[in-house]
Amino acid sequence: QKEVEQNSGPLSVPEGAIASLNCTYSDRGSQSFFWYRQYSGKSPELIMSIYSNGDKEDGRFTAQLNKASQYVSLLIRDSQPSDSATYLCAVNGGLHQLIWGAGTKLIIKP
Amino acid sequence: SQTIHQWPATLVQPVGSPLSLECTVEGTSNPNLYWYRQAAGRGLQLLFYSVGIGQISSEVPQNLSASRPQDRQFILSSKKLLLSDSGFYLCASFRDAGANSPLHFGNGTRLTVT
């Protein structure tokens, strides 16, 4: 069975520090990887997508993909209280299928 | 750009009552549409998907059903709700037609079965 694993947290990070979120996946054939942010009571919103090994940067966010080790991570630099949310990792599992992690709750402390 | 509308935003229903949640999509044609459920503190569970009018695929056995009467309309239903049906229901579509496209979600419906 295809799985995506995330540490449920909560992960507590001081404001201004780097938050590091990790995700591992089981399907070696996966080609697409996504990070979503979900505020309490709201729907998930896409913040990063990554398709090839290495780093991809977008503002304060950096996604890192290592297909050989089957992990994908999200770094948030200069963390702000508004970054406090649950971060969901999703991996393409085939046609019509995204495999979802349970999410990591991130708390940024002022 | 694509917009997904869901209603109602919140719903409280007694056990045994029927359910109808509606999702409509603007800004695209012939989208693949998806119903997900998220239980409290849990990940997203795919319930149904549809690749076209009248075409429904179910991912999990349950007392819910889905229908797609129009190209941009997707409905989630139940004849008799169970307590375990409580959760956050999300309608989604892929942002574009590419194989690596991310999912885009509506605002969701919070269902509480009492």
Image (cartoon, coloured by chain):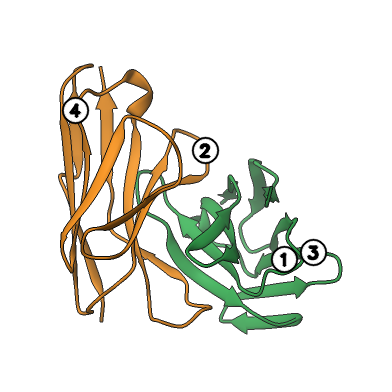
Locate residue B58, reporting x and y percent: 39, 47
- The residue under label 2 is B42
Locate residue B40, reporting x and y percent: 45, 33
Three-letter residue code for mark 3: Gln
Do circles 2 and 3 both sit on a common chain? no
- The residue under label 1 is A72
Q: Which mark is residue A56?
A: none
Q: Which chain is orange?
A: B
Tell me the quadrant of the picture where the N terminus of chain B can be found: bottom left
Q: Which chain is green?
A: A
Locate residue A102, reporting x and y percent: 58, 44
Q: Chain of mark 3?
A: A
Please identify the residue farthest to the front as the structure is shown: B54
Element marked by disc 2: loop
Q: Which mark is residue A70?
A: 3
Is residue B99 placed above or below A92 in the rendered structure? Answer: below
Mark-to-mark CA distance, 2 and 1 = 20 Å
- Residue visible at 72% across and 73% down? A64
Query: On the rendered structure, is B28 left or right of B86?
Result: left
Crowding around mark 4 (Cα neighbors within 10 Å: few <14, some 14 to 19, many 20+) is few
Say which of marks 2 and 3 sits in front. Answer: 3
User: Do the numbered discs 1 and 4 sit on residues whose CB atoms are within 8 Å?
Assistant: no
